[in-house]
Image: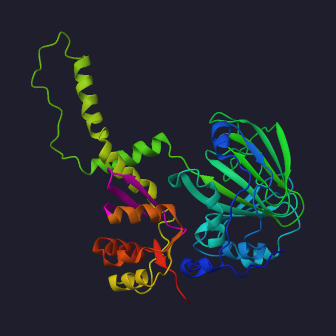
Amino acid sequence: AYVPCGASPRLAFCRAYAQRGSMDFQNFDIDHFLHTHWQKKPLLIRNPWSNWQNLLEPDELAGLACAEEVESRLICQPAGGWEMEQGPQGEERLAELGESHWTLLVQAVDQHVPAVADLIAPFRFIPNWRIDDVMVSLAADQGGVGPHFDQYDVFLIQGLGRRRWQIGPLCDGDTPLLPHEDLKLLAEFTATDEWVLEPGDILYVPPGFAHNGVAVGSDCMTYSVGFRAPSRSDLLGHFVDDILDGIPDDELYRDPDLARQANPGEILPDALVRLQQMMLESLSDPASFARWFGTFNSTPKYADMDWQPETPVEPEDVRASINDAVPLLRNPASRMVFIANGDDALMLFADGICFDCVGETAAVAKILCAQDSVILDAALASAPAVVDLLTQLCNMGCIAFESEE
């Protein structure tokens, strides 16, 4: 049984960085991995960490699962089937769980626990815009979620205890699934590879590969670093919705060169070309697409979460913090990326908002996107555009100067 405790879903990221440790790899060939395995085939990586330490206690994860604003699931495997319970979880329910055949899954733990957010850093050879979140699972003996496949890349890091992972063949939309309202489990699963992962071991699984993980013993914790990829339907649907707002109603089909045709019931090829061109002209502006995609991609996964400071930050506060060399920290829950607009200009996207930056402001934006923590040059306190940008980002909750409290 697990008694939820200790983990607040609103850990103040600006107060927690002092206790953060470094997470890095030793003897891991990034270029070889990208060339040979990324989105191609699974890979078992035996403990590549310089000093692996589990980042979260089981009871702390249970505490997060009980919070209203945290997405969680409890999957149990009673005799004859699978059951799933959506969160928030109840403390009494978690405390009464048995000694086997259940798994607790908590999404986006990196947004609430800075130590877990640090787990992403070694994987930043993958662009930031592809990062989704870190899901953490806690399983009792024989617990798992069943054989399945995902549509995203994932690094499965064994944090505590042991888990047996089986890898199967590639799957697609035609692969048979078991009938279940909540879970997409494979109707048939034949393992092609099998390993038992110890703490610190990593299993990389590309999109589409069947896999099945089962806890070997109690206190089995797995950290799943997931990477998203937009689908063609998502891109088209959201982009078209966005550009429709900017198209005047009086932009109608026109054919001033119309000539009499043999059969009035036929739609002629030149009409089809003109109609298709009307649509493609709206979709083919690279600058418009770049601005839209940056906004779309940086929109928070959990838009209802409010990370704004209780007291608004003023420009003089920002200037004072820069002058005092106070570390500037990026909120792990914030999505920040940029698109270059030339040698000295860029569009900074922070949680769905676009900021046009040039000169010193563009340089600062690049730093914010690349580093979780930075001490800014004191000279920037005298740059009004930089101070204005940082003030806005602080009041959005995207960044904060480290608190001494």
Q: Residue 351 magenta-drawn?
A: yes
- Quarter of the image where one finds residue 321: bottom left
Who's the residue at 31% across and 78% down the image? 382
- x and y percent of residue 251 in the render? 17, 40
Q: Quadrant of the N terminus?
A: bottom right
* Residue 35 shown left or right of residue 329 in the figure: right
* Residue 326 shown left or right of residue 224 in the figure: left
Q: Is residue 217 above or below residue 306?
A: above
* 139 vs 14, nearest the viewer: 14
Res. 353 in view:
no
Q: How is the image coloured?
A: rainbow
- Quarter of the image where one finds residue 87: bottom right
Q: Is residue 194 above or below residue 272?
A: below
Q: Is residue 299 above or below residue 56?
A: above
* 385 vs 397, nearest the viewer: 385
- x and y percent of residue 267 in the render? 25, 19
- Magenta stretch secondary structure, dominant: strand
- x and y percent of residue 147 in the render? 77, 46
- x and y percent of residue 208 in the render? 66, 40
| First to last magenta residue range | 332-359
Q: Residue 384 magenta-drawn?
A: no
Res. 379 in view:
yes
Who's the residue at 52% across and 81% down the image? 402
